[in-house]
Image: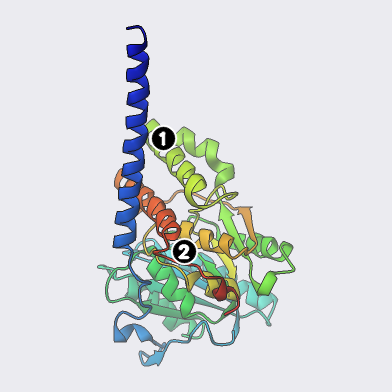
């Protein structure tokens, strides 16, 4: 009779393991069945064009073309009519001053309006009229795709040898691009001309914890654990929107990207690590700006689901990163 409780414990443990395994198999099956093909770059015909400073349509270039600028800056924007001008003024002020100091320096800023419902495109186009469409271009997506989809569109329409992702809120001080450039250069020699430098807010963790509620802090730690456990090792802050890529690295990673919403950064770095692209994580100056589009609980829940599905879809073969792509 004394062994009966022990038998019940063992039976309960076995049932628990069996249920967990069954749940994992079911989730993997759902992840495999719901996996979609890579979204098309141009979902509407008008997304193949941009308006020059005179308001005339011109065909967008391709990342497969040879670069004609030293730096491209891609700014994904959704309902950013209020925050965008501050970021653009700082960025263009810095870029223009840098060009004055070094006349050989060339750049472009690409604002991708991700189906905004406000006047984001009109606000951005004023900078195109002021600086010219060779320096500032506005791409307007017909429907909202998500931050990852907007960044991908800007990347594939860029002309730079190096491509910088920068958020429209201006949370990261734009001159910190020089820190990323140094981090990128320190990774040389670049294999196949590929390297990535990620801006990082990890050094601000203690300060951010002090300003957050316990619930948001718990969500943050949970997300970071899932990123480490499921997808990306060795990068403390995958979500900072300030990233610098060589043209080859941008082409390789974004050509394989499936996620178009908030978790796209994680898949981007997952792909980079698969292809053994060197990655540097660089501390940057960052300030939280009001107006974030993230809804704390639901956005974190969506990203957690995306992380799990990223891992499962690659594991089950629903999504593939073929070795042949390394040579293509």
Q: Position of residue 174 (x, y in %)?
A: 56, 62
Element marked by disc 2:
helix
User: Mark 2 and mark 1 in contact (Cβ < 8 Å)?
Assistant: no
- State the quadrant of the C terminus: bottom right
> Residue 111 or 152: which is nearer the viewer?
152
Question: Which residue does the image show at 36% across and 61% down from the upper left?
Answer: 261
> Residue 220 or 164: which is nearer the viewer?
220
Disc number for residue 28? none
> Residue 294 or 117: which is nearer the viewer?
294
Classify residue 242 as left or right of residue 302. right
Which residue extends farthest left? 117
User: Dot 2: within a 10 Å radius of its alpha carbon, few (fewer than 14), some, or many (20 or more) residues?
Assistant: many
Q: Position of residue 151 (x, y in %)?
A: 43, 69
Q: Which residue is mark 1?
A: 218
> Residue 52 or 181: which is nearer the viewer?
181
Disc number for residue 87? 2
Could you say which quadrant of the image residue 198 lies in? Answer: bottom right
Q: Is residue 29 above or below residue 252?
A: above
Question: Which residue does the image show at 62% across and 72% down from the upper left?
Answer: 97
User: Dot 1: within a 10 Å radius of its alpha carbon, few (fewer than 14), some, or many (20 or more) residues?
Assistant: few
Comes first in the chain, label 1 or label 2: 2
């Amino acid at each position: 009779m004394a062994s009966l409780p022990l038998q019940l414990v063992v039976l309960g443990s076995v049932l628990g393991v069996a249920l967990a395994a069954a749940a994992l198999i079911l989730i993997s099956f759902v992840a495999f069945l719901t996996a979609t093909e890579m979204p098309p770059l141009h979902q509407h015909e008008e997304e193949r064009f941009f308006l020059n400073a005179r308001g005339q349509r011109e065909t967008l270039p391709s990342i497969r073309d040879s670069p004609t600028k030293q730096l491209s800056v891609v700014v994904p924007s959704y309902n950013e009519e209020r925050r965008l001008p501050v970021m653009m003024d700082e960025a263009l002020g810095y870029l223009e001053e840098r060009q004055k100091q070094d006349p050989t320096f060339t750049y472009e800023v690409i604002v991708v309006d991700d189906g905004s419902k406000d006047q984001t495109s009109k606000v951005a186009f004023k900078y195109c009229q002021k600086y010219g469409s060779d320096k500032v271009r506005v791409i307007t997506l017909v429907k909202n795709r998500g931050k990852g989809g907007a960044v991908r569109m800007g990347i594939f329409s860029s002309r730079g040898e190096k491509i910088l992702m920068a958020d429209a809120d201006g949370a990261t001080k734009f001159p910190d691009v020089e820190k990323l450039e140094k981090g990128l250069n320190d990774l040389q020699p670049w294999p196949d001309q590929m390297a990535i430098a990620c801006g990082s807010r990890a050094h601000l963790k203690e300060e951010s914890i002090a300003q957050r509620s316990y619930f948001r802090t718990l969500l943050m730690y949970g997300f970071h654990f899932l990123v480490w456990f499921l997808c990306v090792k060795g990068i403390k802050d995958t979500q900072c929107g300030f990233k610098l890529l060589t043209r080859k690295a941008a082409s390789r990673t974004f050509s394989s990207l499936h996620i178009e919403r908030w978790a796209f950064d994680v898949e981007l770095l997952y792909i980079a690590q698969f292809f053994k692209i060197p990655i540097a994580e660089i501390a940057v100056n960052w300030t939280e700006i009001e107006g974030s589009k993230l809804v704390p609980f639901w956005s974190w829940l969506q990203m957690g689901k995306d992380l799990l599905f990223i891992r499962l879809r690659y594991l089950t073969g629903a999504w593939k990163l073929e070795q042949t792509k390394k040579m293509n």
